[in-house]
Image: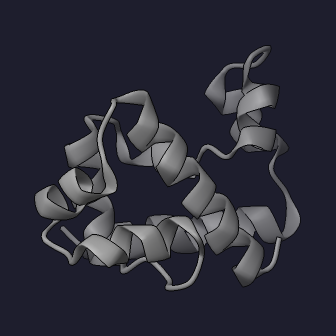
Amino acid sequence: MNVENFYREFGKRLKQLRLQVGMSQEELAERVGVANKTVSYWENAHNPITLSKIPLIANALNVPVYKLFVFLDIEEKAADKDYTTLLQSITGEKLNILFNVVKELQKLK
């Protein structure tokens, strides 16, 4: 998965979670403290997500941070596996992306 695909998948996941809780883009933008169009840009992969906004988005959607990164292909696999097994099965570029996201999230503390 390259960076562009990552942002596209993140955007899809963000929209999915936002709709699941019945929240508009405007409501999410207000809760996160960004302009209304910013959420649309994130969801449509026009602008990259700022790492400092990730915990705010998770909080606004009332989900743990990792849920923002459980993309459909991984989530489908997770139906039959626990997360330890799932994480052990991630390799290559996806593992590298996940590692970098975790490193950046640790810097936010």
Quarter of the rendering occupied by the C terminus: bottom left
Does 3 sit left or right of 27 as displayed? right
* Residue at horizontal 59 percent and vertical 76 percent from the top: 45
- Quarter of the rendering containing residue 34: bottom left
- Quarter of the rendering containing residue 44: bottom right
* Residue at horizontal 53 percent and vertical 41 percent from the top: 16
Residue 103 visible, this orientation: no
What scheme was used to colour the molecule?
Answer: one colour
Residue 86: x, y in percent? 74, 34
Residue 19: x, y in percent? 44, 37
* Residue at horizontal 28 percent and vertical 55 percent from the top: 57
Q: Residue furthest top?
A: 80
Q: How many marks?
A: 0
Quarter of the rendering occupied by the N terminus: bottom right
Q: Is residue 20 above or below residue 98?
A: above
* Residue at horizontal 71 percent and vertical 82 percent from the top: 3
Residue 87: x, y in percent? 70, 41
Residue 69: x, y in percent? 56, 51
Does 4 sit left or right of 99 as displayed? right
Q: Is residue 79 above or below residue 61?
A: above
Q: Who is closer to the viewer here, 59 or 92?
A: 59
Does 92 sit left or right of 27 as displayed? right
Q: Who is closer to the viewer here, 84 or 29?
A: 29
Q: Who is closer to the viewer here, 23 or 48?
A: 23
Residue 102 visible, this orientation: yes
Does 28 sit left or right of 96 as displayed? left
